[in-house]
Image (tube, helix red, strand yellow):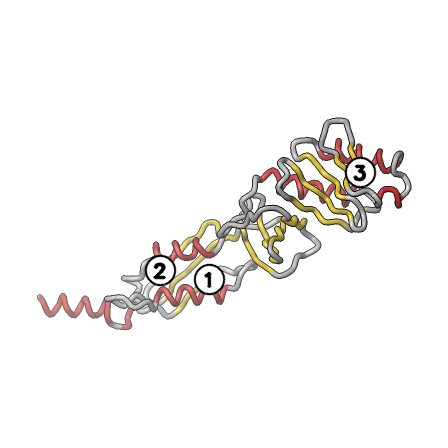
């Protein structure tokens, strides 16, 4: 009986009969699947008392924890298919904005989760520049969602409704409830995130048609403040 139990244990645990040989991973668009492969194999080859690349011993929960720590994924599933295969399936969280801080561009969702990090931005997405206190955490931009959604909606409104101000940067600093737009060679325009965008843009366009109809006069201003009710302040 001892020989039988020992032989069975050797066959199940120490022999190569159930050793991990193949890793199958869902296709990824936001990160390298080779990096994920490397992470899985590192976990499988970790030096422990028993061989961790044996699929009867392999710790799926520990692998899931490490994947969750590194990637933003939905519906992550890890399955063992005996005798030699591990299957990792998932769907990826999407990004919709870019956050610029300390010369890095972080591709984020509207909750501030960092999905990707790059050295450049793409023009198809709204980029928000941080000119205030550091807001990047370990894997998240620590800012209220209202700033992110307002900045994106404001950028789209500029694209669709405002002519002649296409060269601009949207940024935040330490002013509360404020999104600012720096017009190239022109003023900083201040918006209140608690007020409707269209209401503030109507004030801006009225100002451009009437008091600052001359482009030189408009560009000579240092700021235009649209944050306070029906009033407009500029200098």
Mark 2 or mark 3, which has the lower sequence index? 2
Nearer-the-camera pick, 143 or 65: 143
User: Which sits in the foreground, 177 or 202?
Assistant: 177
Kind of element beneath mark 3? loop
**Gap in angstroms between the C-alphas marked 1 and 2:** 12 Å
Is 22 positioned to the left or the right of 214 in the image? left
Q: Which residue sits at x=71%, y=37%?
A: 191
Sequence-wise, the earlier of marks 1 and 3 is 1
Question: Residue 223 versus residue 137: which sits nearer the camera?
Answer: 223
Q: In which quadrant of the rendered image does the N terminus lie? A: bottom left
| Contact (Cβ within 8 Å) of mark 2 with mark 3 | no
Q: Nearer the viewer, mark 1 or mark 3?
A: 3
Q: Residue at x 66, y 57 (%)?
A: 121
Point out residue 102 in the picture as x, y percentages from the top left corner: 60, 56
Question: Looking at the picture, how far across and down is residue 44, in whole percent?
Answer: 35, 66
Q: Nearer the viewer, mark 2 or mark 3?
A: 3
Dot 3 surroundings within 10 Å: few (below 14), some, or many (20 or more)?
few
Residue located beneath label 1 in the image: 25
| SS class, disc 1 | strand
Q: CA distance from mark 2 to mark 3?
A: 67 Å
In primary-sequence order, the first of circles 1 and 2 is 1
Residue highlighted by disc 3: 235
The residue carrying pointer 2 sits among few (fewer than 14), some (14 to 19) or many (20 or more) residues within 10 Å by Cα, namely: some
**Residue contact between numbered discs 1 and 3, judged by CB atoms under 8 Å:** no
Q: Is residue 111 above or below residue 32?
A: above
Spatial separation of the CA atoms under disc 1 and disc 3? 58 Å
Q: Which residue position is annotated with label 2?
A: 80
């Amino acid at each position: 009986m001892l020989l039988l139990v020992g032989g069975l244990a050797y066959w199940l645990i120490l022999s190569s009969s159930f050793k991990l040989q193949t890793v199958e991973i869902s296709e990824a668009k936001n990160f390298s699947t080779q990096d994920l492969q490397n992470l899985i194999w590192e976990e499988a080859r970790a030096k422990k008392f028993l061989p961790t690349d044996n699929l009867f011993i392999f710790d799926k929960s520990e692998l899931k924890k490490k994947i969750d720590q590194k990637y933003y994924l939905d519906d992550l599933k890890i399955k063992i298919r005996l005798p030699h295969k591990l299957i990792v399936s998932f769907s990826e969280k999407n990004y919709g904005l870019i956050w610029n801080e300390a010369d890095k561009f972080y591709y984020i969702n509207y909750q501030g989760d960092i999905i990707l990090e790059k050295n450049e931005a793409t023009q198809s997405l709204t980029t928000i520049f941080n000119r205030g206190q550091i807001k990047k955490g370990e894997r998240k931009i620590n800012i209220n969602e209202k700033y992110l959604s307002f900045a994106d909606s404001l950028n789209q409104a500029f694209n669709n409704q405002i002519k002649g101000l296409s060269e601009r940067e949207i940024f935040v600093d330490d002013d509360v409830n404020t999104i600012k737009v720096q017009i190239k060679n022109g003023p900083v325009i201040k918006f209140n995130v608690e007020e409707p965008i269209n209401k503030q843009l109507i004030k801006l366009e009225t100002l451009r048609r009437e008091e600052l109809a001359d482009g030189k006069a408009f560009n000579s201003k240092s700021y235009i403040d649209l944050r306070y009710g029906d009033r407009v302040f500029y200098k």
